[in-house]
């Protein structure tokens, strides 16, 4: 290799680092530009693939929950009862349908305002993760996080859907931000009593968006208690944080649970937990065995199918939603006891399909070249992000144990683990998109920053400077 060949890569690296330094010096402008681009992309997709009257996306109408949320909202607005056509229900958590109902009450029947609201939630989510990335890894990671969140195809698509995940993602972003910056920050940093209360409230609203947020809340409680024990804080300080978290959560969830106890005789968050667990025992990643109709399987086990429960024209059900949950639980355990190893094998397949983005609706994919190409493209992008994030996690293990970078990686990993119980039910990529992908993008941004600045000396006061003992 001659001298010119040896110097060429060095010159390219220098230019790359100079560009990175320029972006870092103007990080705020680059983040604002990313937010503007993200908003424009989402507005363009809303205009191109949706209509004000239809909850489904015309490009990929595979996420049909929007129709059920709309029915919940209409029942709330027209009949003053959360449910379907005036019939009370707890089958779906109420937070997102309540937002839809507010939109209907204020702006009429058009669904465009709720989609605009979801774009606003994208801004909230992105700003929170940009702040975390900037504080934990550095300004360049913050800029990379902003751009990745703005143009990540699965996030852009989700903003156009009538999807509760948009609200869930924004709430979890606020929770993660507050945990990293204040609630679980190093000992000695001034904290307000409002912070754990706000985190508890956000967890409560999240639990009424998707019950999976309960796992996040339990995780936050455990981490808050562990932090107090590890840093040898006085018992009252730790207990106060835990009590404020519980109070915030209870203020939001309590009225809903009491309502369900009064109406249905059981203090439940939702009446589709056992239902989804049961469905996951036979609605497998490769479909239902023998190609049977899903309604027939439900009928065979004496469990009401969701389309029966969510039919707004039905004034009553053959039995209550609580009894339906009990029937679903009994049916689930019968199936598992018949073939426990087969059930475990299918849970592992769920995990593989979830992590490799392999779950697509075959009836929509069939004969649709545009959908097939789109699915292939977004899966490729996802796999690139996953690979970069994993590389960063392995190489990041060499970082000093008491840095903000290490703490953020650790927290992101725990939040990802809190989402994994979804594999116990049937696979839906929306679960991974909303509960796991934000942390993969955050970790990927941190990894890219390290690669770009590998040969660049750290500035004074860098976020990678060792911090006092923390997580």
Image: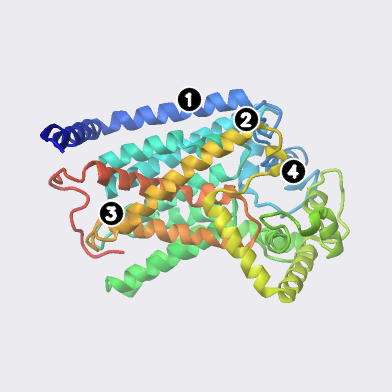
Say which element carries label 1: helix
| Mark 3 lies on residue | 405
Q: Which residue is mark 1?
A: 40
Q: Residues within 10 Å of mark 1 (few under 14, many from 20)?
A: some
Using the image as rendered, state which of residue 401 and residue 39 is in the foreground.
401
Which of the numbered marks, if any, corresponds to residue 370? 2
Look at the picture and state if 203 lies above or below 302.
above
Binning the other alpha carbons within 10 Å of mark 3 as few (below 14), some (14 to 19) or many (20 upward) gives many
Which comes before the other along the chain, label 2 or label 4?
Answer: 4
The label shown at residue 80 is: 4
Q: Position of residue 227 (x, y in %)?
A: 33, 68
Q: Residue at x 74, y 41 (%)?
A: 71
Residue 121: x and y, percent? 50, 38
- The quadrant in which residue 129 appears is top left
Separation of residues labelled 2 and 1 (CA atoms)? 22 Å
The secondary element bearing badge 4 is classed as loop
Question: Is residue 301 something that shows in the picture?
Answer: yes
- The answer to which quarter of the image holds residue 336 is bottom right
């Amino acid at each position: 290799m001659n001298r010119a060949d040896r110097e060429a890569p060095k010159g390219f690296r220098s230019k790359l680092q100079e560009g990175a330094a320029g972006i870092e010096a103007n990080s705020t402008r680059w983040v604002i530009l990313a937010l503007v681009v993200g908003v424009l992309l989402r507005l363009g997709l809303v205009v191109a693939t949706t209509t004000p009257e239809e909850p489904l996306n015309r490009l990929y109408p595979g996420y049909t929950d929007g129709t059920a949320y709309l029915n919940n909202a209409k029942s709330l607005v027209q009949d003053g009862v959360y449910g379907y056509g005036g019939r009370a229900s707890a089958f779906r958590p109420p937070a997102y349908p309540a937002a839809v109902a507010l939109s209907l009450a204020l702006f009429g029947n058009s669904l465009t305002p709720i989609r605009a609201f979801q774009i606003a939630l994208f801004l909230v989510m992105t700003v929170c993760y940009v702040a975390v990335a900037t504080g934990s890894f550095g300004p360049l990671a913050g800029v990379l996080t902003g751009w990745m969140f703005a143009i990540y195809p699965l996030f852009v698509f989700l903003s156009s859907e009538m999807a509760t995940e948009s609200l869930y993602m924004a709430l979890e972003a606020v929770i993660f931000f507050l945990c990293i910056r204040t609630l679980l920050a190093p000992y000695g940093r001034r904290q307000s009593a409002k912070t754990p209360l706000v985190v508890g409230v956000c967890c409560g609203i999240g639990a009424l968006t998707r019950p999976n947020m309960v796992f996040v809340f339990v995780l936050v409680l455990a981490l808050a208690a562990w932090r107090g024990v590890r840093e040898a804080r006085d018992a009252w300080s730790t207990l106060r944080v835990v009590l404020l978290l519980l109070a915030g959560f209870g203020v939001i969830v309590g009225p809903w649970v009491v309502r369900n106890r009064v109406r249905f005789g059981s203090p439940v968050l939702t009446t589709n937990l056992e239902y989804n667990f049961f469905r996951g025992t036979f609605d497998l990643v490769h479909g239902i065995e023998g190609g049977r109709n899903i309604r027939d399987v439900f009928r065979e086990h004496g469990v009401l199918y969701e389309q029966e429960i969510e039919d707004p024209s039905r004034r009553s059900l053959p039995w209550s939603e609580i009894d339906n949950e009990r029937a679903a639980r009994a049916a689930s355990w019968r199936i598992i006891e018949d073939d426990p190893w087969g059930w475990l094998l299918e849970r592992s397949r769920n995990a593989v399909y979830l992590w490799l983005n392999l779950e697509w609706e075959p009836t929509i994919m069939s004969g649709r070249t545009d959908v097939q190409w789109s699915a292939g493209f977004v899966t490729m992008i996802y796999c690139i992000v996953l690979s970069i994030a994993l590389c960063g996690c392995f190489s990041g293990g060499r970082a000093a144990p008491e840095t903000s970078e290490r703490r953020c990686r650790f927290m992101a990993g725990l939040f990802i683990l809190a989402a994994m119980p979804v594999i116990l039910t049937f696979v839906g990529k929306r679960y991974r998109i909303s509960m796991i992908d934000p942390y993969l993008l955050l970790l990927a941004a941190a990894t890219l920053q390290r690669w770009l600045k590998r040969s660049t000396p750290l500035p004074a006061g860098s976020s990678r400077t060792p911090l006092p003992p923390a997580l």
